[in-house]
Image (cartoon, helix red, strand yellow):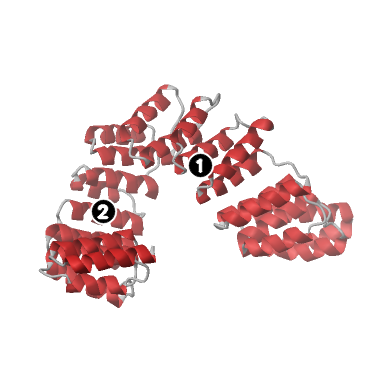
Amino acid sequence: MSWRNALRLSHRTGPHNFEETCSKIVSYCNKQLLKEGICVHSPIIKAGFQDNLWISNNLLALYSKCYGVDHARHFFEEMPYKDVVSWSGLLSAYVKDGCYEEALELYDLMKFSGECPNEYTLSIVIRACSALRDCDQGTKVQACATKNGFDSNPVLTSSLIDMYSKCDKKEAAQKIFMNMRNGDTVSWTTMISSFIQEGSWITALRLFICMIKREIQPNEYTYAKILSACGGLTYLNSGRLVHARMLVLGIRLNLVLKTALTDMYARCKRMEDAMKVSKQTLEQDTVLCTTLLSGFCHNLEIKEAVDAIQQMVAHGITPNSYTYAVVLNGCSLALTLQLGIQFHSRVIEIGLENNVSVGNALIDMYLKCSGGIIDAFKVFEQIRSPNIISWTSLIAGFVEHGLGYEAFQAFEKMQLVE
């Protein structure tokens, strides 16, 4: 029986059954991301069930997932009644859509309305503060959490650790972590990730070992992070031990883990192992292929890198700007000007010559591989929004070629632009 027929039948059998059927349909469509669930909105209004908060909150989530935050906000404004779930649902929609400042404005509006946030609400707001690096606002939200007795909630504390880490408040992040009574996998992974972010790979490894000893099971993101630490340190034996543990526990090799393992073996100059891991399952994407390509380039296996990018295209996987930046950096390392020129032509062909990461790689390639600065300067002029790396590379190029006056002019111009 279709959901439309179910609606008609329940309408005949009475209002209670009709309301219950509407509720089930909207809830099901919300979980399955089915836009058809929106069609129930009109019969709900006609039947006078718009006061049902359960249905309204499910519809709000459905509008958010299927039509975006603007439609969700419009529906939210029309809701006759709202609770903490309603506010939190819209807040979550803003954060997922990257509208962090709007999320904080909505949070202020929520407080003004008299609705009290719960731990889930506060964790969403903390994520917005984290994305904006707004430590002052985040500290206020933490105070609110402490006042309401939510400071031991693992989801909230994980969000706080992440925020303080991103705001370079490592001591505050560590203090929260150390004071946790019931740390879970997410909070441990967040703390490990914060150490890796700042380059404290050995500390991250020690924390991972402590996590295992306390019998807190790592998830795929924990393993991916710790593999990146092993790769950064070129600790091949540690990386192999982590890989062996994953095999013993029967952890499924998804794309995230496969990419992390490939990167670890590539950084440890074990390209055969990296290739073997990358081919263990059929799943492939641009990130995995670019990781393998990066390994070839850093190990100066340029022929293999060219073969890898050709196979990537042959399998219908589209290289992105980072892919071309990687292969151009490989040309710089191997001092292969002609190959770099060929990839430059490809970059122009697909319209990436204005991309800053590709442009920076081209500048570096021409400065290292050619005898002059003209080509590098031409590339610089094509970049739509040069960053500090672009300017620094250009200035360094002028200095290396004895063009002190031009270097000083570029430095002055950079300060004006920045």
- Badge 2 element: helix
Please name the residue that numbered disc 2 is placed on: 292
Query: Residue 189 occupies which quadrant of the picture?
Result: top left
Q: Nearer the viewer, mark 2 or mark 1?
A: 1
Residue type at mark 1 is: Met
Residue 117: percent from the left, percent from the top?
70, 42
- What residue sits right under mark 1 in the picture? 163
User: Mark 1: which secondary structure?
Assistant: helix
Task: Tell me if 356 is positioned left or right of 154 in this view.
Answer: left
Amino acid carrying mark 2 in the image: Leu
Q: Position of residue 10 (x, y in %)?
A: 83, 57
Q: Is residue 91 visible?
A: yes
The vertical placement of 169 against 388, above or below, is above
Left or right of 51? Residue 255 is left
Above or below, comparing residue 149 to residue 305 in the picture:
above
| Location of the N terminus (image quadrant) | bottom right
Choose between 391 and 38: the one closer to the eye.
Answer: 391
The image shows residue 170, relative to residue 333, as above or below, that is above
The answer to which image quadrant residue 149 occupies is: top right
What's the residue at 64%, 31% (across, down)?
146
Q: How many marks?
A: 2
Residue at the spot 68% in from the left edge and 31% down from the top edge: 147
Pinpoint residue 394: horizontal percent, then vertical percent. Answer: 24, 65
- Residue in the image at 43% along x and 33% along y: 218
From the top left corner, tell me how far across and down residue 314 is, in percent.
Answer: 28, 67
The mark nearer the N terminus, 2 or 1, is 1
